[in-house]
């Protein structure tokens, strides 16, 4: 009986295709949306991924995620360096700055300051120039996506001219020379990223007593990472997390404190209900239209068990 009903349904091509399309659309949304959500959540800790060095991130205890910067005093860096088991510790500045483009427009940017001596934490993939070029006077590196979009200058005919090495920017009334273009990941706010040295970043941003955002720590070989973490926390009173834990904390903050999960959940549930309703309604109308034929076949002795067709050729 079921096999005959399936053949009858496939014979009604309009209803059959409508059911298949509804279920395919539902399956597409329920698989595609979680992947989109995962891509967005990965952007929440893209800065940590782009840094790519160090075993431990040290920060103010009240920091909740990577963009929730609570500045510390520069002296905290030396306290961390004095902890047993630390191979090296470098400062990182992370903040926002407004850039004035050559055509006079303004654009908010993420501003990153790297350790002057080592330049650890700089972009790993350079398209133009090198990270060492940051040692030149007034030097900055811009990210590739920002250089072609929000930092590009307008040209006649509504064309955008990307930033290249040698172009000039004005950062908080300070001259900045682009010495390189780097390929990095997209950040959650889709803002352009500008790299410079830690000392230069301090001179570009408004003067504050505390400007140290994070301390990157590398653990000496032969020392336990967990033991070094505990020493840093005990000796400095600061928060210290392994890189993976800091990434997880940043992602979970956005999951718990924003409506991103609720919004995606509503869309997925709506897709399931909508696709299921269309497929169910189509199948229901098909059943009603052919109910008299099912009754005749039942009267002739057709079995209801799957793939059993007693009395029917």
Image: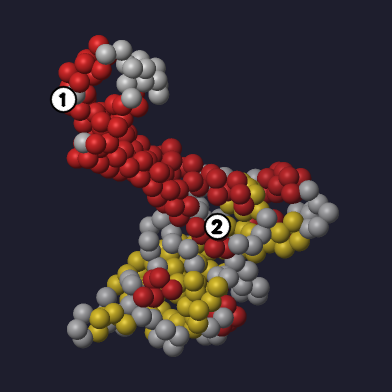
Compute the Cα span from label 2 to label 1: 60 Å
Q: Nearer the viewer, residue 49 or 38?
A: 38
Judge whether 110 appears above or below 99 on screen: above
Q: In the depicted view, which residue is nearer to us: 145 or 48?
A: 145
Task: Report helix, strand or loop for mark 1.
Answer: helix
Looking at the picture, tell me which residue is in the foreground, 262 or 113: 262
Image quadrant occupied by the C terminus = top left
Q: Position of residue 254 (x, y in %)?
A: 43, 44
| Residue 147 visible at all | yes
Binning the other alpha carbons within 10 Å of mark 1 as few (below 14), some (14 to 19) or many (20 upward) gives few
Q: Is residue 274 left or right of residue 183?
A: left
Give x and y (percent) for residue 17.
25, 41
Q: Is residue 169 above or below residue 39?
A: below
Quarter location, residue 297: top left
Which residue is drawn at the image coordinates 61% and 49% (left, top)?
244
SS for callout 2:
helix
| Residue that label 2 marks | 48
Which residue lies most toward the right here? 222
The residue at 66%/73% (across/down) is: 118
Q: Are marks 2 and 1 in contact (CB under 8 Å)?
A: no
Lower position in the chain sequence, tag 2 or tag 1:
2
Left or right side of 44 for 270 = left
Residue sitting at 20 percent across and 28 percent down?
Answer: 286
Which of 73/45 is in front? 45
Look at mark 1 in the image and give the residue it sits on: 289
Question: Residue 98, image x and y in percent?
Answer: 36, 69
Residue 191 horizontal/vertical position (percent): 38, 64
Q: Is residue 278 left or right of residue 56?
A: left
Q: Is residue 134 above or below residue 13?
A: below
Is 300 displayed left or right of 51 in the figure? left
């Amino acid at each position: 009986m079921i096999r005959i009903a399936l053949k009858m349904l496939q014979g009604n091509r309009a209803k059959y295709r409508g059911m298949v399309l509804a279920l395919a659309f539902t399956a597409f949304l329920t698989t595609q949306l979680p992947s989109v959500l995962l891509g967005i959540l990965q952007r929440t800790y893209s800065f940590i991924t782009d840094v790519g060095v160090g075993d431990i991130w040290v920060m103010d205890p009240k920091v909740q995620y990577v963009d929730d910067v609570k500045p510390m005093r520069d002296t905290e860096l030396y306290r961390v360096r004095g902890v047993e088991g630390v191979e090296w510790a470098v400062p990182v500045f992370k903040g926002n700055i407004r850039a004035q483009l050559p055509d006079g427009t303004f654009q908010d940017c993420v501003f990153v300051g790297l350790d002057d001596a080592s330049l650890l934490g700089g972009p790993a993939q350079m398209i133009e120039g090198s990270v060492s070029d940051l040692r030149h006077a007034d030097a900055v590196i811009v990210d590739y996506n920002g250089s072609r979009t929000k930092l590009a200058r307008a040209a006649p005919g509504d064309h955008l001219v990307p930033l290249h090495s040698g172009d000039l920017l004005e950062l908080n009334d300070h001259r900045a020379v682009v010495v390189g273009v780097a390929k990095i990941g997209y950040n959650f706010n889709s803002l352009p990223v500008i790299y410079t040295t830690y000392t230069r970043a301090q001179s570009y941003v408004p003067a504050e007593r505390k400007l140290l955002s994070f301390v990157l720590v590398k653990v000496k070989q032969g020392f336990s990472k967990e033991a070094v973490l505990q020493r840093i926390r005990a000796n400095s009173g600061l928060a210290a997390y392994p890189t993976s834990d800091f990434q997880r904390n940043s992602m979970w903050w956005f999951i718990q404190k924003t409506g991103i999960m609720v919004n995606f959940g509503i869309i997925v549930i709506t897709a399931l209900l909508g696709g299921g309703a269309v497929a169910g309604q189509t199948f229901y109308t098909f059943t009603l239209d052919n109910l008299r034929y099912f009754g005749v076949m039942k009267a002739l002795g057709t079995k209801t068990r799957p793939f059993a067709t007693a009395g029917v050729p």
